Amino acid sequence: MSYDLKAFCRDLQDRLSWLFKEVARLQEENERLLQENQALREEATLSRLFRELGDEAQTEMPAPADTNNFGSGVPPEAMAFFRYLPESLDFANYFEAADAYGIEGDQARDWMLIFFRESLLEHRGRVLRKLDPNPFPVRVAR
């Protein structure tokens, strides 16, 4: 009887060991899938934003390029939010900053479209970078 009990315990330990390894593997896979899901959501958001930006650009008359009015199509409150943003951020950080600034998600998305259209934001990979809103600063002669 004691031999059967020892064999049963060994078998139970082996199965528990396998089960713990399987749980650890599934946790790692879950983390990987969560990261992949986040990346896909960011890409889908970017795709939707560019598609909406493209639709707006097709329906609007092209404005003549005027380097003296860089960012002139940006509402003042949007420009204040733009100045609040860090120099580089990702989509999640952008919407977190908008939330902290007190801006609703739809309004933040609309402003992001304006920032792209006015060349205030640049998208590289997963990173958004602010561009200089005044590329030709006025210098005072000495």
Image (tube, rainbow, N blue to C red):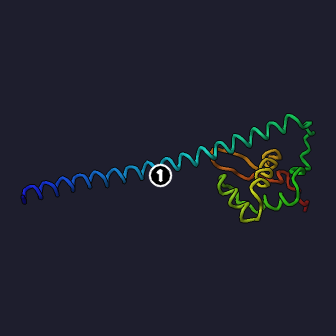
Q: Quadrant of residue 57?
A: top right
Kindly identify which residue carries mark 1: 31
Query: Whole-percent x and y of residue 45?
Result: 68, 45
Tell me if residue 70 comes above or below residue 139 in the rendering: above
Quadrant of the rendering where the N terminus is positioned: bottom left
Query: Whole-percent x and y of residue 134?
Result: 84, 54
Query: Whole-percent x and y of residue 41?
Result: 62, 46
Residue type at mark 1: give it. Answer: Glu
Crowdedness near tag 1: few (<14), some (14–19) or many (≥20) residues, C-alpha within 10 Å: few
Query: Which residue is at 82% across, 51% downward?
Result: 135
Q: Is residue 104 visible?
A: yes
Query: Whole-percent x and y of residue 42?
Result: 64, 47
Element type at mark 1: helix
Which is more toward the observer, 17 or 55? Answer: 17
Which is more toward the observer, 129 or 52? Answer: 52
Q: Quadrant of residue 66?
A: top right
Query: Which residue is at 37% across, 50% downward?
Result: 25
Q: Is residue 120 visible?
A: no
Query: Which residue is at 10% across, 55% downward?
Result: 4
